[in-house]
Amino acid sequence: MKTLPYQPDRSGLAYSVGTTLDRFIKLKQSDFPFASGELSQLLRDIALAAKIVNRETNRAGLANIGGAFGQTNVQGEEQQKLDVIANIRFMRALSKGGEVCAIVSEEEDAVIDLQNSSGKYVVAIDPLDGSSNIDVNISIGTIFSIYRRKSPVGRPIMEEDIMQPGTEQVAAGYVLYGSSTMLVYTTGNGVNGFTYENSLGEFFLSHPGIQAPKRGEIYSINEGLEREWESGVKAYVDLCKDRKYAARYIGSLVADFHRNLLKGGIYIYPATRKNPSGKLRLLYEANALAFIAEQSGGKAIDGNRRIMEIKPNSLHQRTPLLIGSKEMVVEAQSLITNTEKKITEYSH
Ligand code: AHG
Ligand code: MN
Ligand code: MN
């Protein structure tokens, strides 16, 4: 007989690079006192839907399923076929599992009440982010936030279950369908990133304990809209240029955010004259990324308020977003608030 000695992981951690997502979720479950395993199961459901959407994304060009579907979504934007597919996949995964009672989706006008009064969780989701990039083979993503319902289990869902500020998130994450597919998530105890291994059909821990650099040399903003910005945003972007920072803008929030998270940088989608509340949505875009940013040592604001403290008053509410490396966001914030102050002083 040949024997093989047991080889403990040298890192001393039960989870290290190479741990599968399933195993990681299971090991992490003990972080939550009285955890019943439902949140863990919900995360697994999301990961499964992500694998399916990943497959559809990879096939988009081949199967000719990319391109406009000829419909518009609730925001009046052109809805792409893959948006619809991703929405269906995630809806199915979330409704089958039994842990969820309600879903808010970018692609759905109203709250989806799953009529599952025993479901403890509410999910807000952008099933496919950066959808204008599908047809040109550029990275896209999925963004999700998970909340615990406020009303008692066993009762119909209420508005208070849905309209929760980001500080109430119990977990949040994103999937990036890029040159490789990644799932990055937090349950409020740091941020971990998993890379998908296509041939094995598994996500493996590749980025444990992600820490965002305190500052970086990248700024990401749609500069074509410069004339629409308020002067504080312009002042900050000028400062970035004085310092010769690199401008990087993919137009897929998940991809832009992910790059800046790893390399250090700031992403800005400011208020514009046309859209005084910006473009991005609080419930299923800004909050999840804000949670991840903060959990990795970064910061997310709407100009002066912390994103996660904004109390939502409508489902598809938009918010300006400045997010990324902490010191950069703080610097942008002070330029924005100082310039605003000056303008009010002059106008008196
Ligand atoms: P979605 O595809 O879910 O509608 O989101 C698109 C968003 C976001 O991903 C991206 O950062 C932003 O729109 C780009 O907007 P602009 O084209 O106005 O820069
Ligand atoms: Mn989006
Ligand atoms: Mn979308």
Image (cartoon, grey):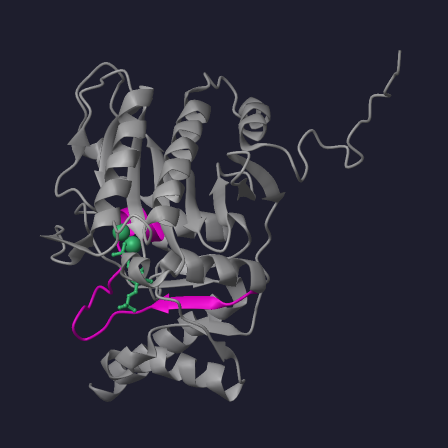
Residue 169 can be seen in this image = no
* Screen quadrant of the N terminus: top right
**Observer-nearest of 201 and 22:** 201
**Observer-nearest of 289 and 66:** 66
Q: Image quadrant of residue 168?
A: top left
Tell me: residue 51, above or below residue 67: above
Place of residue 186 in the rendered image (x, y in percent of width and height, measured from the top left): 49, 40
Place of residue 134 in the rendered image (x, y in percent of width and height, measured from the top left): 31, 57
Tell me: residue 201, above or below residue 289: above
In the image, is residue 284 part of the stretch drawn in magenta? Answer: yes
Q: How many marks?
A: 0
Place of residue 240 in the rendered image (x, y in percent of width and height, measured from the top left): 48, 81
Tell me: residue 298, above or below residue 45: below
Ligand 2: quadrant of the figure: bottom left
Tell me: residue 189, above or below residue 93: below
* Screen quadrant of the C terminus: bottom left
Place of residue 129 in the rendered image (x, y in percent of width and height, measured from the top left): 32, 53
Tell me the magenta residue range. Answer: 264-287
Whether residue 235 sits left or right of residue 111 in the image: it is: right
Whether residue 198 sits left or right of residue 166 in the image: it is: right
Residue 263 can be seen in this image = yes
In the image, is residue 329 part of the stretch drawn in magenta? Answer: no
Which residue lies at the image location 40% right of the left edge and 55% below the top edge?
254
Residue with the most extreme top position: 1
Which residue lies at the image location 16% right of the left edge and 36% below the top edge?
111
Q: Image quadrant of residue 343?
A: bottom left
Residue with the most extreme front position: 62
**Observer-nearest of 158 and 175:** 175
Which residue lies at the image location 82% right of the left edge and 26% below the top edge?
7
